[in-house]
Amino acid sequence: MKNRIREFREREGLTQADLAAAAGVRRETIVFLEKGRYNPSLKLAHDISKALSTSIDDLFIFDDNVCEYIVLEE
């Protein structure tokens, strides 16, 4: 999943540490999110979008063409 966190964070004049504090996570979490190395929970996505005064839909871009499958072993 792609996101526009950095774009919106910079537009709001926030540092990664500022956004992390507002969302209740560590700065490293914001770093990983901005680099696309971590997909947030729905709650975290909500908290971040609220801190950035935008909607989840505007902040996160889901690519329908990229699907990940998890194989469960019995």
Image (cartoon, rainbow, N blue to C red):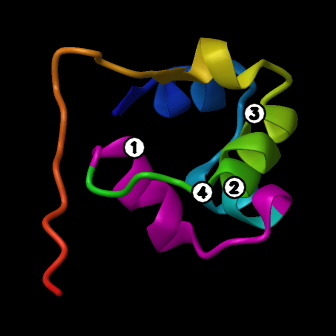
Q: Which residue is mark 4?
A: 41
Question: Which mark is drawn over residue 49?
Answer: 3
Q: Amino acid at mark 3?
A: Ser
Q: CA distance from mark 1 to mark 2?
A: 13 Å
Up-down relation of residue 46 to residue 61 (above or below):
below
Q: Residue 47, how many percent across, how many down?
A: 80, 49
Cα separation between marks 3 and 1:
13 Å
Mark 3 vs 1, N-terminal side: 1
Q: Residue at x 26, y 55 (%)?
A: 37
Q: CA distance from mark 2 to mark 3?
A: 8 Å
Q: Which residue is mark 1?
A: 34
On screen, residue 50 versus residue 32, left or right, reads right
Give the residue number, with chain letter if any, for mark 2: 44
The image shows residue 74, relative to residue 8, as above or below, that is: below
Residue found at x 67% / y 44%: 45
Query: What secondary structure do most residues of the magenta stretch adopt?
Result: helix
Q: Residues within 10 Å of mark 3 (few under 14, many from 20)?
A: many
- Closer to us: mark 4 or mark 3? 4
Indicate the position of residue 39 as horizontal and vertical percent values: 42, 52
Q: Is residue 34 magenta?
A: yes
C-alpha gap between disc 2 and disc 4: 5 Å
Name which residue type carries label 1: Glu
Counting from the top left corner in percent of width and height, residue 69 is at: 16, 50
Instruction: State which region is magenta.
Output: 22-36
Pointer 4: residues within 10 angstroms few (<14), some, or many (20+)? few
Element type at marker 2?
Answer: helix
Q: Secondary structure at mark 3?
A: helix
Which of the two discs, 1 and 4, labels the residue nearer the N terminus? Answer: 1
The tag earlier along the polypeptide, 2 or 3, is 2
